[in-house]
Amino acid sequence: LDEQPFVCEMTLIEQTMAFCKTFTATKQTKATEEKKETEHTNPEGSEVLIRKEDREEEFFFVPTAKKKNKSKNTGAKAEGSTKPIKHNAVTFKLFDDLKLDAPITTDDIPGLLEKLEEQLESYKVKVQKWAEKREEMKRKILEDGILPDEEEKEVEE
């Protein structure tokens, strides 16, 4: 009576959601660098050069030639960031256990995440109903010493 039902199913759904979110996560994990003001304690008359990135570029001639685009796939980038997802047998089995279709591209993931959240909510409701019944069953066992299921069997005989 103390073991919670649907633990495996709920963890499988949560892990699958985490798996799907790895494909939709934008790559904003770059650490923001804090710019520190440096004090220069140099003797008078000396000059301090600034970093090359911060310098204003001076052109002695105006560049006229445009850079050539080496990429042959310019049309694919314009469509969006739909990338195919490579699956192995294990991921196909996990999605099959959840009775869902495995996402083929990254565009399929938002709809799949909604379905996974609905499944998770349904399992949470089932666990909540089980928790309410568990207290009732414990009380009956302590009072009568008989499980409700066993009680029904005795009445039938």
Image (cartoon, rainbow, N blue to C red):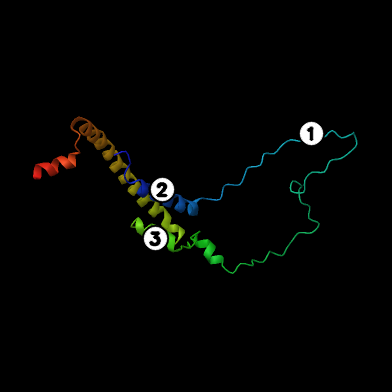
Label 1 to label 2: alpha-carbon separation: 51 Å
Label 1 to label 3: alpha-carbon separation: 61 Å
Query: Which one is earlier in the sequence, the residue at label 2 or at label 3?
Result: 2
Residue 70 position, x and y percent, is 64, 67
Tag 2, which secondary structure? helix
Residue 155 seen from this side: yes
Residue at x 71%, y 65% (from the top left corner):
65
Tag 3, which secondary structure? helix
The amino acid marked with disc number 3 is: Lys
Q: Is residue 11 left or right of residue 143?
A: right
Q: Is residue 152 left or right of residue 58?
A: left
Identify the residue position indicated by label 2 in the image.
14
Residue at x 52%, y 65% (from the top left corner):
76
Tag 1, which secondary structure? loop
Query: Which one is earlier in the sequence, the residue at label 1 or at label 2?
Result: 2
Whether residues under marks 1 and 2 lie with C-beta atoms below 8 angstroms apart, the answer is no
Residue 88 position, x and y percent, is 46, 63
Query: Which one is earlier in the sequence, the residue at label 1 or at label 3?
Result: 1
Residue 46 position, x and y percent, is 89, 38
The amino acid marked with disc number 1 is: Glu
Whether residues under marks 1 and 3 lie with C-beta atoms below 8 angstroms apart, the answer is no
Identify the residue position indicated by label 1 in the image.
39
**Residue 16 or residue 48, whichever sits in front:** 16
Query: Where, by quadrant of the figure, is residue 145 drawn?
Result: top left
Specify the label residue 93 is tagged with: 3
Circle 1 packing at 10 Å, graded few (<14), some (14-19), many (20+), is few
Residue 100 seen from this side: no
